[in-house]
Image: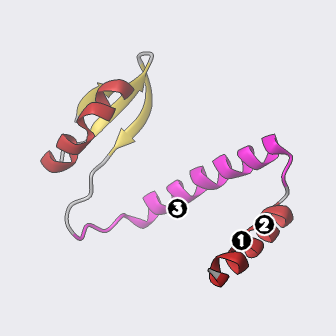
Amino acid sequence: MKMTTVREFRKRVASLMREGDSALITRHGKPSGLFLPLGEGAEIPMDLRMALVERVGAAVSKALAAKGATEKEVLSDFRRHKKTRRRR
């Protein structure tokens, strides 16, 4: 596994994907993310999927709370958007 900064990762992401290298991404010297390329037809293990869904859900909930938005408002906006999109 390679270790890279966020800036360097942005520059090298395509080559990392091509080479199939995983990388620990750091920001200000502290771990910030993990890049794990999946091979052709690779299956993500269920426990990793569950952990990813938990992290994404928590991030979305935090962002909604910071904006003062409720789940009901978001769903309403989404439905309204879908209706206008179909009319195009």
What's the distance in space between the residues labelled 1 and 2, CA to CA?
6 Å
Majority secondary structure of magenta residues: helix
Q: Which residue is mark 1?
A: 81
Describe the element under mark 1 as helix, strand or loop.
helix
Check if residue 61 falls in the magenta segment: yes
Q: Residue at x 58, y 50 (%)?
A: 55
Q: Which mark is residue 50?
A: 3
Q: Which residue is mark 2?
A: 77
Check if residue 66 falls in the magenta segment: yes
Q: Where is residue 53 drawn, in percent x and y? A: 56, 59
Quadrant for residue 16, please give it. top left
Q: Where is residue 74 drawn, in percent x and y? A: 78, 62
Q: What is the quadrant of the N terminus in the image?
A: top left
Q: Is residue 49 left or right of residue 42?
A: right
Q: Where is residue 73 drawn, in percent x and y? A: 85, 63
Describe the element under mark 2 as helix, strand or loop.
helix
Quadrant for residue 72, please give it. bottom right
Disc 2 marks a residue whose amino acid type is Asp
- Which numbered mark, 3 or 1, is in the foreground of this view? 1
Describe the element under mark 3 as helix, strand or loop.
helix
In the displayed structure, 19 sits above or below 77; it is above
- State if disc 2 and disc 1 touch (CB < 8 Å): yes
Color theme of the render: secondary structure
Q: Residue at x 81, y 43 (%)?
A: 67
Question: How many other residues sit within 10 Å of disc 3, few (<14), some (14-19) or many (≥20)?
Answer: few
Give the magenta range: 41-69
In depth, the one of 32 and 13 nearer the eye is 13
In the displayed structure, 83 sits above or below 75; it is below
Residue lying furthest left in this view? 19
In primary-sequence order, the first of circles 3 and 2 is 3
In primary-sequence order, the first of circles 3 and 1 is 3
